[in-house]
Image: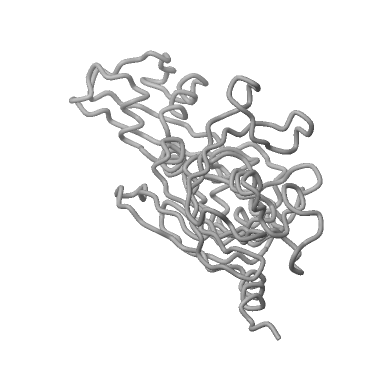
Amino acid sequence: MQEKILHFTIPAEHAGDRLDRVLRDLHPNMSRAQWQRLIREGHVTRQGGPVQANYKAIGEEEIKVIIPAPEPTNLLPENIELDLVYEDDDLIAVNKPAHMVMHPAIGHMTGTLANAVVYHWPDVLSVGGERRPGMVHRLDKETSGIVLVAKHDYALNYLVDQFKARTTRKVYMALADGHIRPEKALIDAPLGRDPKDRKKMAVIEPGKSATSQPSQTRYELTERFERHSLVTCYPITGRTHQIRVHLAYIGYPIVGDHIYGRRNRSIPIKRHFLHARQITFKRPSDGKEMTLEAALAPELEAALMELRKPKA
């Protein structure tokens, strides 16, 4: 992406308003924080000179903005096929497969969702930072399901704000070991970093760890099998590993979860059985609420079909 030059004539009704707010209103694809950074770095000028960070518009002045080309990136675009669920001018929704990491990290520098996204949508590389281009939220490596990716900064901020405000609604499908009791309940158990293993999360009472945060998951039984329960989960908060830890905490760990579940898998599956099936949010373009759904992964469907077979 090359350097961009934008020209604005500030409307008279904005006289007395801070310039960063005015520019955000005139060009909402960029956040106010981004406009503040451009002003601070001298990329916003009036009459050939840079404006100050606290500059207030006088109305009808001409403003020139230079948006620098993004810095060279080490993120390698890769032609990886994606299961596209939805796309518009603001966002992309994909059904992430299990075993795909969200973004490059030590041990997983290629083959990630970020590598695939910047191949198919190159402009996303400049959205939100190189390491997680356009990523609105994340799923664990072995968790499949729906992921939202923003195409521009306004959409990213608009969607992230909904996650922070907990106005998005998410639905997960999990297969748990055992016959879950009660069949419908709210798990209200604070989560924090496990003091014995910093890579894991654990239920930790408030005040006993600086990392402990309130965490709630609502669930209900969807289908019962001989030794398993198919459970629909509705996370209210969005903590790391939340559903996995909560189900293990009440004694019904997710099938195939080698971190929080049983050491020996109760069915032959090469991942944990957790799928982000559905998400409801407001669309950045018009604020309209929409619900997107990602089909259950084939290996999970096959596992359920096997469990449904009559026993000899």
> Which image quadrant for residue 137?
top right
The C terminus - image quarter:
bottom right
* Percent x, y of residue 283: 36, 50
As drawn, 13 above or below 231? above
234 to the left or right of 21: right
89 to the left or right of 136: left
Q: Nearer the viewer, residue 86 or 269?
A: 269
Residue displayed at 35% across by 49% down: 282
- Colour treatment of the image: one colour
Q: Nearer the viewer, residue 279 or 154?
A: 279
* Percent x, y of residue 80: 67, 63
| Outermost residue, bottom side | 312
Residue displayed at 36% across by 20% down: 47
> Which image quadrant for residue 39?
top left
Total numbered labels placed on residues in the image: 0
* Percent x, y of residue 293: 46, 63
Q: Nearer the viewer, residue 111 or 312?
A: 312
As drawn, 61 above or below 307? above
* Percent x, y of residue 111: 73, 56
188 to the left or right of 228: left
Q: Nearer the viewer, residue 143 or 75?
A: 143
As drawn, 54 above or below 102? above
Residue displayed at 39% across by 58% down: 291
